[in-house]
Image: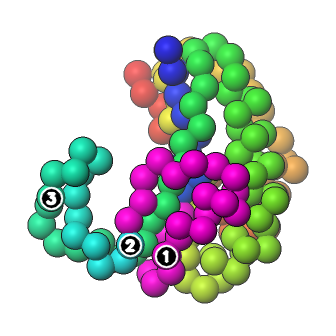
Amino acid sequence: MTAGNISLRFWHPTEDLTFLSSMLGLPCHRRWLSGDRRQTPKGLLLKGTYKDSYWASRIEFLAGKGFEEKFLLAINCLVKAENDILKLVQSGGKAEVYLQLPGDINHGMTIDKNSIFILGGMGVDLSFEVFP
């Protein structure tokens, strides 16, 4: 059973971000293009259009184990594409590592200063969401 996930999320006002799948070596979990009609993850159409293009990949981990390994996998995927990610951010895009963690489990991991430095150097934000 999946306990949480680590998502790599990207936005850009004009670029089609489909290339991120091959660049990062990760499957796309959800994507859209700037100007596409808004819709729910299940395809229900909503009012309006998306302002920015979006691409996300999700790396899942199990309860009580795998968080540190999967976090390092995400960092390594980003490092492989460091120059391209930096260009994307510098051209008006946004990049984010988004951690969704269950609140009923102690993951007990320190995100070391090297990982934080790597993310910051590429202009990648680090976001957390903990669920009770």
Instruction: Identify the residue position indicated by label 2 in the image.
Output: 33
SS of the residue under disc 1: loop
Query: Which is more N-terminal, label 1 or label 3?
Result: 1
Segment tinted magenta in the rendering: 10-32
| Three-letter amino acid code at the position of disc 1 | Asp
What residue lies at 61% left-to-right and 63% top-to-bottom? 20
SS of the residue under disc 2: loop
Residue 67 in sight from this viewpoint: yes
Q: Position of residue 99 (x, y in %)?
A: 56, 40
| Three-letter amino acid code at the position of disc 2 | Leu
Q: Position of residue 57 (x, y in %)?
A: 55, 49
Q: Position of residue 121 (x, y in %)?
A: 79, 67
Instruction: Identify the residue position indicated by label 3 in the image.
Output: 45
* Colour basis: rainbow
Instruction: Estimate the spatial distance between the alpha carbons at disc 3 and disc 2, rounded to whole Å.
Output: 15 Å
Extreme residue in the front direction: 22
Measured along the vertical axis of the image, is residue 55 above or below residue 72?
A: below
Disc 3 residue crowd, few under 14, some 14–19, many 20+, Cα 10 Å: few
Query: Which is more N-terminal, label 1 or label 2?
Result: 1
